[in-house]
Image (spheres, rainbow, N blue to C red):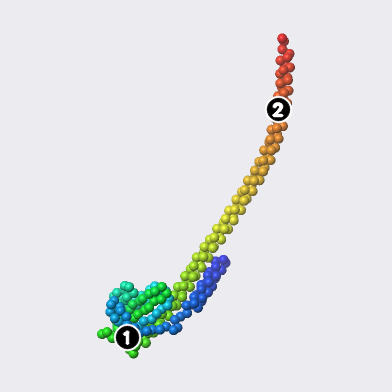
Amino acid sequence: MKTSAFHSFLSILFCSCLFSLAAAFSPLQAQTVSSVTQNVDKISLAGLSIDVPIEGKFVEKEWEALIKSYGKVATGRNGVYKIPAAKVAVLSSEPLNVASKVSTEKNKATIFLAVDQGSGNYVTPGNEMYGDVEALLKSFAERTQINYDIKLANDSYTEAQKKQDRLTKQSEKLVRDIERNKKEKENLTKRLEENARELEQLQRDTETAKTDLESSGKDLETKKLALEEAKARMPK
C-alpha cells in the first residue's frame, strides 16, 4: 500500500515537473532560419543556419545523432561534420554532399547546414530544396527543445526520487533509533529495579550483620567472664 502510494506520488511529481518545464521552455514557434555563408574547415560554404536557445552541448549531441543517421561522417571534430554521400530522405532520394558546423555556447547553439546537390550546387534561397532544408532545421530545433524539456523533467524527477529515498532512509533510521532507545530504556529500567532490590537486600543484610555482631559481642563477653571464673577456681 505504501509503495503504491509512493509511486503515485512520484508519477504526479514527474507530470507536474514536465508541465512546469514545458511552460517555462515552450516549443520554438518563432524559429528563424537564415541563409548564410560560413567557413567550414577554412572553406566558405553557402547554407542555412538556425539558433537553438538551450544548452549548447545538449543541442550538439542531438545534432550529431541526427547527422550521423544520414551516413558515415568523414570528419567530426570541433563541431564540423561532413558526409560526402548523405542519404537524407526528407530532402532527396539521391545522395547529397552535406557539411555542417555546430557552434555552442552555455545556453545556445547555432546549427549551420550546407547541402550540395552536386557539382557545388548548394541550396540557397530560390532553390526548390530550400524550403525542405529549412523545415528540416526547424523540425530538429522543435524536437530538440522537447527532448531537452523531457531531460529537465527527468532530472527533476530523479532528484526528487533521490530526496524521497534519502528521507525514507532517514525516517527508517529514526524508527530504528527509537526502538533501540526503547530497549535501552527498558534495560536501564530493569537494571534500576534490580539495583533497587539489591540495595534493599544489602540494607537488610547490613541490619542482620549488625544484630549478629552485637549478639556475637555479648556472647564473647559472656565467654570471657566464664573463662575468667574458671581460671579463678584454679588452686593457688
Relative image position of residue 8 (x, y in whole percent): 54, 71
Give the image location of residue 152, x and y in percent.
46, 72
Q: Can I make out residue 106 in this image?
A: yes
| Residue 182 sits above or below residue 67 on the image | above
Q: Quadrant of the C terminus?
A: top right
Which residue corresponds to mark 1?
Answer: 123
Rendering coords of residue 58 (x, y %): 40, 73
Closer to the chain start, of discs 1 and 2, is 1
Q: Which residue is mark 2?
A: 216
**Residue at (41, 73) in percent of width and height:** 106
Q: Please indicate whether residue 85 sits to the left or right of residue 154 in the image.
A: left
Numbered disc 1: secondary structure = loop
Left or right: residue 147 compared with residue 89:
right
Quarter that holds the N terminus? bottom right
* Residue 6: image location, x then y, percent: 55, 68
- Which of the 4 image quadrants contains residue 199? top right
In the picture, measured across the screen, residue 172 lies left or right of residue 128, that is right
Q: Is residue 128 visible?
A: no
Residue at point 49%, 70% (across, down): 156
Answer with the quarter of the image where residue 101 lies.
Answer: bottom left
- Which element is circle 2 on? helix
Number of other residues with Cα within 10 Å of mark 2, as a class: few under 14, some 14 to 19, many 20 or more: few
* Amino acid under disc 2: Ser
Q: Which mark is residue 88?
A: none
- The mark lying in front, picked from 1 and 2, is 1
Q: Residue furthest left?
A: 119
Amino acid at the residue labelled 1: Val
